[in-house]
């Protein structure tokens, strides 16, 4: 079942981020960000996949509205992850389809995402569901 994220999902999402994405984050930060971002319904789109048998959150998708002077309104996918033992069951595809349907209802013109160069299996997944790689780029960051 796909539903909107809740604060009670923090530990599950924390585990998914750690295991599936390699992002270690504290429970406190996760709770704070879920509370903040889930209330920003015009900018953040966050859905979880809850396993119907165990009622555990086993995957999630997070996107944010992207709009600029030179483009129509689109979405940036910030994260899509499913626990390894639940991969290959169509959960990622269902999350993507859910996001796409809701985006089209709101007249979003495109969805884009970045995927680390080494995530070859993820690239195959995105290509299989209709996404194309339209450029390569380097990321620059300055941490304060």
Image (cartoon, rainbow, N blue to C red):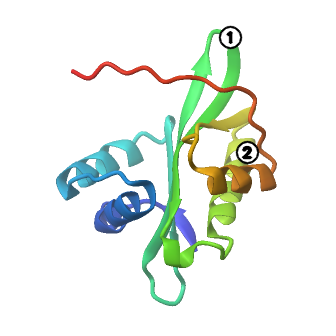
Q: Residue at x 63, y 63 (%)?
A: 92
Q: Quadrant of the C terminus?
A: top left
Is 16 or 65 nearer to us in this picture? 16
Q: Residues within 10 Å of mark 2 (few under 14, many from 20)?
A: few
Q: Is residue 82 visible?
A: yes
Question: What is the secondary structure assignment of the residue under circle 2?
Answer: helix
Q: Is residue 74 above or below residue 94?
A: above
Question: What is the secondary structure assignment of the residue under circle 1?
Answer: loop
Q: Is residue 23 above or below residue 78?
A: below
Q: Position of residue 66 (x, y in %)?
A: 58, 27
Left or right: where 31 falls relative to 70: left
Is 108 or 87 nearer to us in this picture? 87
Is 136 or 95 nearer to us in this picture? 136
- Quadrant location of residue 141? top left
Report the residue marked by disc 2.
105
- Quadrant location of residue 72? top right
Q: Quadrant of the N terminus?
A: bottom right
Q: Residue at x 52, y 80 (%)?
A: 51
Report the residue marked by disc 1.
70
Q: Is residue 108 visible?
A: no
Instruction: State the residue lying farthest toward the top.
Output: 69
Left or right: where 24 falls relative to 84: left
Q: Position of residue 95 (x, y in %)?
A: 62, 60
């Amino acid at each position: 079942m796909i539903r909107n994220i809740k604060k009670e999902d923090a530990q599950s999402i924390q585990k998914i981020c750690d295991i599936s994405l390699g992002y270690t984050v504290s429970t406190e930060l996760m709770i704070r960000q879920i509370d903040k971002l889930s209330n920003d319904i015009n900018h953040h789109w966050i859905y979880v996949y809850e396993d119907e048998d165990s009622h555990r959150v086993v995957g999630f998708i997070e996107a944010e509205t992207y709009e600029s002077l030179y483009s129509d309104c689109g979405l940036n996918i910030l994260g899509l992850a499913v626990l390894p033992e639940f991969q290959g069951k169509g959960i990622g595809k269902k999350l993507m389809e859910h996001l796409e349907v809701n985006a089209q209802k709101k007249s979003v013109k495109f969805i884009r995402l970045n995927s680390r160069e080494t995530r070859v299996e993820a690239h195959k997944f995105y290509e299989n569901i209709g996404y194309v790689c339209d450029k390569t780029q380097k990321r620059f960051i300055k941490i304060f």
